[in-house]
């Protein structure tokens, strides 16, 4: 990837106007010195999305997303950082020279060759529909314009059709081999076509480049039924959704995406004018694919096959999307239909009615389980409910969890209070497991006291108001070691250094030091928070932080005294420290009370 010098990035950012960029996607209204609108990243009725023209930053106080103009484009358009910088530069008419090293240029050239190779292959597959592919598609009764829109083609029943293609001679065979278009014969230097006698479906990335292919057999005796390109430098199976490139504008317009299993299901929906559709290609959705969907909508509708495998896949995939806080529902197709066959038999209007009467995954699952649970023992029922509750441990939306527990209580006639208690125990156990496995080290907020974290956040927000008197007071009474949250600690450390060296804060310099989405989201939130009576509020935050720090040490000493077979000398030391802590807590409390009585 080309590295654009920081000075050039700063030039581009300085020339841009975050309000005008965001206004292309969000209807903004003036709110004091800022602008406010409905967040494009989650569904809300009351605007909580704030844009500051003064600080050139945005933040949503509903979902927590925030950052500068580049971060916004990255999120709303699913761009990389470099792509977002180039997009802004292009809009402003700023030329970015080619800063790449020879090695970077060579690497980029290889990617260009891979894309070019797939394009050549696609021209071959779609140049004509070979028999019996043409007849097969005619029997499926798909519109020609739909097939053209998705570049559906075919591979003839030949071992050397692609290899002998005239344009193949201009491309090194190694690229065809890397992309899985050809295979080498055993113990020889000869190649043969990998895709033969199949309908071909090209996979597009979000930029419209072809990254791979899927092939559906024409001879029912051939194996496998579906043959896909292997993963390569440009194709990662878990990061591509079939049809997304063509569906983006419709998904945004409809504010929902319909997810089907197969290529033909998708093409049939498009035939009937339903454009906001993607296909998971019969596989389990990955979290990356879920996040891809969330870039464009927060509402997902599964329209999978009506057989047992289709229902199970829809339930399984719905959990992945629910953990990303999407609104998920299921279309209940009558057996033995899939979307393709149902639309052909019943028509588009009937399918739209099915969409309108869709159900949530939990409603469907509870109906299934209620019938099965009648013949189960108490222990089996208990395990069944535990298994059900564990499905929802990772769902971040607490309101949705509350509704789900209510539904489970109603269906199984179990006290809701019991389910809440049981769910919390499972949640606590799950958090403990994650913590001890050290797989959640990137989320320290899971294990912090909310009061402490909120005090730390608010204290930094007060600093960012840039009131000299208040800043001096904070820096006199608090230090980096008093912060427990690593993100907030990092921001406070940056602010401390800047204040010592410059006497004020440089927001752009701080942004440069923030390397993760979490850090940028946190910083944008703290920058745009409104704090009244900042000096008195700062005193309260400092009191909470110091008290929490001492309380933590106090409890730690009690634990050590209980667990250790301490000597008389160590016990005396612990006892003295406990006495000192109690005395310090009293002093802090008195200091706080005196301060609060002062009319500030």
Image: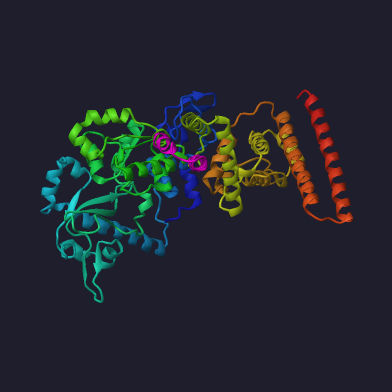
Would residue 147 appear left or right of 302 to someone viewing this image? Answer: left
Check the picture and name the quadrant holding the N terminus: bottom left
**Above or below for 329 versus 511:** above
Q: Residue at horizontal 45%, vertical 33%?
A: 42
**Above or below for 456 versus 199:** above
Main SS of residues in magenta: helix
- Seen from the viewer's position, the closer of residues 311 and 374 is 374
Q: Residue at horizontal 40%, vertical 35%?
A: 371
- Seen from the viewer's position, the closer of residues 31 and 42 is 42
Q: Residue at horizontal 53%, vertical 47%?
A: 516
Residue 466 image position (x, y, % from top left): 65, 35
Q: Residue at horizontal 48%, vertical 45%?
A: 11
Residue 22 image position (x, y, % from top left): 43, 34
Q: Is residue 6 visible in the rendered structure shown here?
A: yes
The magenta-colored residue range is 366-390
Q: Is 372 colored magenta in this rendering? A: yes
Q: Is 49 colored magenta in this rendering? A: no
């Amino acid at each position: 990837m080309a590295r654009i010098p920081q000075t050039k990035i700063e030039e581009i950012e300085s020339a841009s106007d975050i309000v005008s960029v965001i206004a292309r996607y969000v209807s903004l209204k003036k709110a004091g010195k800022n602008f406010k609108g409905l967040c494009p990243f989650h569904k809300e009725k009351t605007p909580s999305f704030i844009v500051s023209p003064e600080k050139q930053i945005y933040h949503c106080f509903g979902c927590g997303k925030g950052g500068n103009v580049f971060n916004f484009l990255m999120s709303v358009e699913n761009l990389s950082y470099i792509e977002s910088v180039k997009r802004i530069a292009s809009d402003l008419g700023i030329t970015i020279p080619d800063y790449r090293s020879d090695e970077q240029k060579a690497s980029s050239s290889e990617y260009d060759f891979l894309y070019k190779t797939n394009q050549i292959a696609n021209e071959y597959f779609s140049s004509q529909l070979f028999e019996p592919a043409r007849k097969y598609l005619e029997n499926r009764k798909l519109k020609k314009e739909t097939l053209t829109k998705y570049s559906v083609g075919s591979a003839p029943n030949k071992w050397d059709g692609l290899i002998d293609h005239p344009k193949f001679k201009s491309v090194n065979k190694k690229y065809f081999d890397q992309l899985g278009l050809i295979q080498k014969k055993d113990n020889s230097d000869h190649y043969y076509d990998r895709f033969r006698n199949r309908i071909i479906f090209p996979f597009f990335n979000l930029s419209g480049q072809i990254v791979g292919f899927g092939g559906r057999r024409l001879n029912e005796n051939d194996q496998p039924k579906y043959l896909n390109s292997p993963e390569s430098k440009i194709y990662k199976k878990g990061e591509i959704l079939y049809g997304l490139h063509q569906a983006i504008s419709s998904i945004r317009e409809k504010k929902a995406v319909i997810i089907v299993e197969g290529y033909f299901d998708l093409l049939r929906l498009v035939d009937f004018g339903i454009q906001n559709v993607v296909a998971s290609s019969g596989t389990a959705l990955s979290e990356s694919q879920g996040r891809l969907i969330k870039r464009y909508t927060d509402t997902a509708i599964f329209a999978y096959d009506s057989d047992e495998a289709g229902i199970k896949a829809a339930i399984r995939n719905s959990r992945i999307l629910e953990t990303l806080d999407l609104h998920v529902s299921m279309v209940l197709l009558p057996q033995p239909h899939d979307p393709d066959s149902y639309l052909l038999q019943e028509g588009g209007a009937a399918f739209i009615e099915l969409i309108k009467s869709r159900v949530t995954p939990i409603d469907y699952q509870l109906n299934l389980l209620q019938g099965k649970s009648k013949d189960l023992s108490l222990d089996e029922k208990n395990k069944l409910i535990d298994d059900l509750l564990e499905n929802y441990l990772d769902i971040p939306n607490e309101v949705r969890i509350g509704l789900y527990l209510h539904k489970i209580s109603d269906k199984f006639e179990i006290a809701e209070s019991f389910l809440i208690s049981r769910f919390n125990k499972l949640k606590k156990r799950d958090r403990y497991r994650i913590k001890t496995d050290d797989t959640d080290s990137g989320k320290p907020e899971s294990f912090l006291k909310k009061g402490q974290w909120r005090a730390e956040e608010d204290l930094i927000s007060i600093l960012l108001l840039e009131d000299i008197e208040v800043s001096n007071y904070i820096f006199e009474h608090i230090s980096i070691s008093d912060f427990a949250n690593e993100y907030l600690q990092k921001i406070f450390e940056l602010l401390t250094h800047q204040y010592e060296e410059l006497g004020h804060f440089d927001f752009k310099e701080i942004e440069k030091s923030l390397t993760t989405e979490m850090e940028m989201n946190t910083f944008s939130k703290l920058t745009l928070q409104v704090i009244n009576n900042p000096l008195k509020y700062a005193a309260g935050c400092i009191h909470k932080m110091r008290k929490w720090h001492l309380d933590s040490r106090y409890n730690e000493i009690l634990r050590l005294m209980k667990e250790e077979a301490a000597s008389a000398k160590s016990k005396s030391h612990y006892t003295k420290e406990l006495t000192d802590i109690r005395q310090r807590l009293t002093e802090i409390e008195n200091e706080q009370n005196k301060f609060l009585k002062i009319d500030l």
